[in-house]
Amino acid sequence: MEIKRNYIKKLGRSADFQDMGVHDYHQPFAGSTASTGAPDTSGTDDDPNQDTGTGVAPFAILINGAAPAQSGSTVIPASSFTIGCNSGNFTITRAGIDAGGTAPQTLGPEELDLNSGFSGTFTTGDGFKDFIVFGVVVFSKNSEGRPNAIVGSNAGGTYNTRIYVRDAEDSTPKFVEGFSDKDTANPLYMFRIGTVRSTKSGSLRRVYVNQGVVGNNEIGDDLPAPDGNLFAFKVVDDGDGTVSVTTGAVNTVTATALTPAGKPTELWLKATFADDIVTAAVVATTAGTSSETSDARQIATITWGGTGSNTPTITQGIKGSQSIASCGGTHQWGTLYS
């Protein structure tokens, strides 16, 4: 069996995935044992315990097969295998990040290693299953919304700055390529390292590896720039026991009262209209009563804690300027992302 050894280094834009080899699980083989996914270069190209590459290449995906059972002269293939991945360095270099110095600026290099070995399985009947190997980088950001450091985890979130393997049909947490959670304090950047497909046809079991990244990974100007502008009606912790609301509009009317007094637990956007035309929009701490001439939409809920109860935990309700259409006492709200 020929195993292709086409490796690429990803610099900037995504490259096509390369077929990194077929791992055959239907043959007897010597010396293979269950593994944690660490490199094992002792096997032959047909050995399920053979890794996909040099064993040391950054981000190389590693496949280690469990030993089959044997009954007399009959080999019973194992129903599982281990997906591993070498650690590698991630660097982001581009204008628009806030890392000090002059543009383009650089964050990293930051070493990513595998969160844990992943036990892949074959289907019970004939068929295939896909798995995703991907890197996650967690950023902190400044008050302008620009990434200013690579950090270990997104506070209160699920992902850390690590390499993960997920079943493609049951990716929990979900893999979202590129930037996600841009409106949080810790935006994530995820990049696909490769995919693994296991197939079963009768007594034949095989694993196919498609490698998208091998080599230390540098991402440059193709990386989407986080929006440096806070979205309309975002509730912001002012850091002194108060909150404020970023500027937004209802239809064409800019809202007022964006700095509510005290420690509100709810914030609402109230619109007033005459002849179904919005005449005023205001941020309020209560919803009030809906009528033919007014209505409200909740902006956020807020709980206060910490020293002196000065730290707000904000659950955002809307993002972006708002639209409203009215017909008598019936009102229909919508969001204009700006």
Image (cartoon, rainbow, N blue to C red):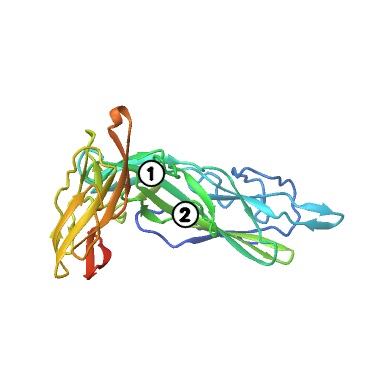
Looking at the rendered structure, the secondary structure element under dot 1 is strand
Q: Which mark is residue 174?
A: 2
Q: What percent of the width, then of the height, locates residue 258?
A: 17, 47
Quick one: label 2 or label 1, which is nearer the N terminus?
1
Q: Which mark is residue 228?
A: none
Q: What percent of the width, then of the height, locates residue 116?
A: 55, 43
Residue ID at (45%, 55%):
8
Question: Is residue 85 at least partly visible in the picture?
Answer: yes
Say which quarter of the image contains residue 265: top left
Q: In this view, does 76 lie to the left or right of 257?
A: right
Q: How busy is the neighbourhood of tag 1: few (under 14 within 10 Å), some, or many (20 plus)?
A: many
Q: In which quarter of the image is the C terminus?
A: bottom left
Residue ID at (18%, 55%):
248
Q: Is residue 321 left or right of residue 131?
A: left
User: Hey, what amino acid is under mark 2?
Assistant: Lys
Frontmost residue, 218 versus 236: 236
Q: Where is mark 1, residue-wise?
A: 138
Label 2–label 1 contact, CB within 8 A: no
Frontmost residue, 241 versus 145: 241
Q: How busy is the neighbourhood of tag 2: few (under 14 within 10 Å), some, or many (20 plus)?
A: few
